[in-house]
Amino acid sequence: MSTPFTLIEGGLTDTVSLRAELRHPSSLREPEVEAWRSLMARAIEPSVYADPDYALTMAQHLADGRTLALLLVWQDGRRAPILRGVLPLQLPARQGLAGRARLWRLPLAGTAEAAIDASHTAPVLRAALDHLRRSPLHLVDLHWPDLRPASGLALALGEAAGSTGRRLTVADQAEAPAPAPAPLTLPSGRTSLERVRDPARLRDAIEHVLVLDARRGPDSLLADPAAATAFRVVTRRFAHRRQACVDLVRRDGEVVAAAVHLATGPHDTIWRQAGLCLAQGPALAPDAARVEALVTVEIAGFVQPQPQPQPTGLRRLMRLRA
């Protein structure tokens, strides 16, 4: 089931048609994944955690029984549709009852991320909310955590809600506990730093990271086989695109610290660190506190019609648990 939405651009002459659909993560075909990768370059808030190689891997290996779906928003193009938005959602466990959709907080990332075209942010959000309203899932509202209060995405969500008469509430979000700092140890021997980029060698470097990370005990990746598998798959997929590297610090030839980077250039993100902290770096400014938003799916004064019988494809989506 898809929901059309028409956007008027540049006066009354040019119209852009947007349509939205809910898809199970495993149902995406390679052209759709490529469209998602292309969208990342246009995203209003680029994040490696909204990348398909990250989000789809987590949905495959770390869904933990959740009912997951991707809310895709497309623009009809002359040759092929253009993907304008991807919202990874966690749907209510009990389908058919009034419930809440949540932007999925991605495992091993700790934040909820979406990929939305910077040039169509508010229209994409309106099309997404309209689709949730018209779907037979009986959704009441959409919970969006981990928003930066003054970000373009947060402002666009407010615009999308206000322009359609939807109620939007925003609340401060409790800060996640900071990870325990690595022990500060000054090197007593010869220390070297190596950055591994070659995909063939990066596989061995990842194993060094996992061995060091195992010192975390029950919180380590190796303590959860599914998490360790997801970690290996994500780094392999990013490395295949030359978008991953591993820093290895050796002391007297032994690897004592490591850091995994995803993406390059301004979007370079340190995903995971393990081992000893060999230097006391300058204090970093803390990130701005984040907020969580709750926006109603229904439009004020709108009476929801009785749902029609569900198409076969949607029944399958509702039965599947990622």
Image (cartoon, rainbow, N blue to C red):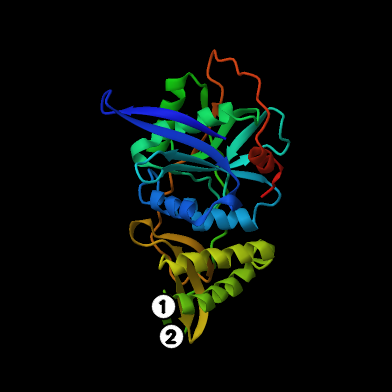
- How many angstroms separate mark 2 from mark 1 (CA)? 10 Å
Q: Is residue 66 above or below residue 258?
A: above
Residue 180 in the figure: left or right of residue 287: right
Q: Secondary structure at mark 1?
A: strand
- The type of residue carrying mark 1 is Leu
Residue under the image location 55 percent in, 15 percent down:
302
Determine which quarter of the picture holds residue 175: top right
Q: Is residue 291 above or below residue 299?
A: below
**In this view of the protein, which residue sits in the foreground, 115 or 23?**
23
Q: Position of residue 160 (x, y in %)?
A: 43, 27
Residue under the image location 56 percent in, 26 percent down:
297
User: Tag 2: Cα neighbours inside 10 Å, few (<14), some, or many (≥20)?
Assistant: few
Mark 2 = which residue? 190
**Which residue occupies the extreme top position in the image?**
301
Mark 1 = which residue? 193
Q: Is residue 72 above or below residue 207?
A: above
Q: Position of residue 70 (x, y in %)?
A: 55, 44
The answer to whether residue 89 is seen in the rendering is yes
Q: Position of residue 216 (x, y in %)?
A: 63, 66
Residue under the image location 43 percent in, 47 percent down:
287
Residue under the image location 49 percent in, 57 percent down:
30
User: Tag 1: Cα neighbours inside 10 Å, few (<14), some, or many (≥20)?
Assistant: few
Q: Secondary structure at mark 2?
A: loop
The answer to whether residue 108 is seen in the rendering is no
> Between tags 2 and 1, which lies in front?
1
**In this view of the protein, which residue sits in the foreground, 260 or 17?**
17
- The type of residue carrying mark 2 is Arg
**In this view of the protein, which residue sits in the foreground, 181 or 120?**
120
Q: Position of residue 100 (x, y in %)?
A: 63, 32
Please give the label number shown on residue 215.
none
